[in-house]
Image (cartoon, rainbow, N blue to C red):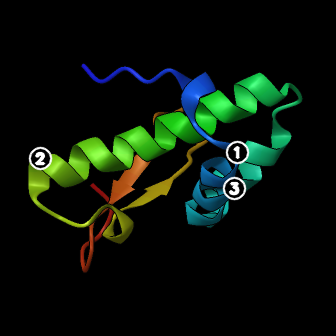
């Protein structure tokens, strides 16, 4: 289990992470009304990438995440289809 105290993440890091979101993630991110929930979503997506990248020995920026209505996010591996 990975835990992160989001309050300890600097605003400039948050701004960088927002730029790393995929298209569907960015659309969902801007829909959150509360800044705290927006930040939680963003940091969760970054932790997801880091955890999967570590397990698969891949650079985190090579992984994609696609949001799906009423479903869990879908991972996209480099040079592969959705998993």
Give the residue displayed 45% in from the left and 55% down from the top: 65
Does the image show residue 79? Answer: yes
Q: Earlier in the sequence, mark 1 or mark 2?
A: 1
Q: Nearer the viewer, mark 1 or mark 2?
A: 1
Residue contact at pointers 1 and 2, CB within 8 angstroms: no
Q: Reply above or below: 45 against 2.
A: below
Task: Measuring from the top left, give residue 67's x and y in whole percent.
Answer: 56, 48
Q: Name the residue nearer the viewer: 71 or 20.
A: 20
Q: Reply above or below: 77 against 25.
A: below
Give the residue displayed 66% in from the left and 56% down from the top: 18
Residue contact at pointers 3 and 1, CB within 8 angstroms: yes
Q: Mark 1 sits on what residue?
A: 11
**Taking 48 as reference, is 31 left or right?**
right
Query: In which quadrant of the rendered view does residue 34 lie?
Result: top right
Query: In which quadrant of the rendered view does residue 6 lie?
Result: top right
What numbered label is drawn on residue 34?
A: none
Q: Mark 2 sits on what residue?
A: 55
Q: Secondary structure at mark 2?
A: helix
**Taking 75 as reference, is 51 left or right?**
left
Q: Earlier in the sequence, mark 3 or mark 2?
A: 3
Q: Name the residue nearer the viewer: 37 or 12.
A: 12
Give the residue displayed 24% in from the left and 73% down from the top: 80
**Taking 42 as reference, is 45 left or right?**
left
Q: Nearer the viewer, mark 3 or mark 1?
A: 1
Does the image show residue 70? Answer: no
Q: What whole-number distance in Å separates the C-alpha atoms at marks 3 and 2?
A: 26 Å
From this viewpoint, which residue is outermost toward the right?
A: 33
Q: Secondary structure at mark 3?
A: helix
Q: What whole-number distance in Å separates the C-alpha atoms at marks 3 and 1?
A: 6 Å
Q: Mark 3 sits on what residue?
A: 15
The quarter of the image holding the N terminus is top left
Q: Reply above or below: 38 against 21.
A: above
């Amino acid at each position: 289990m990975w835990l992160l105290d989001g309050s300890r993440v600097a605003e400039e890091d948050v701004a960088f992470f927002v730029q790393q979101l995929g298209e569907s993630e960015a659309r969902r991110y801007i829909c959150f009304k509360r800044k705290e929930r927006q930040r939680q979503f963003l940091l969760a997506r970054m932790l997801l990438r880091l955890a999967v990248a570590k397990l698969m020995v891949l650079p985190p920026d090579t992984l994609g995440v696609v949001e799906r209505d009423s479903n869990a996010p879908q991972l996209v591996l480099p040079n592969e289809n959705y998993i």
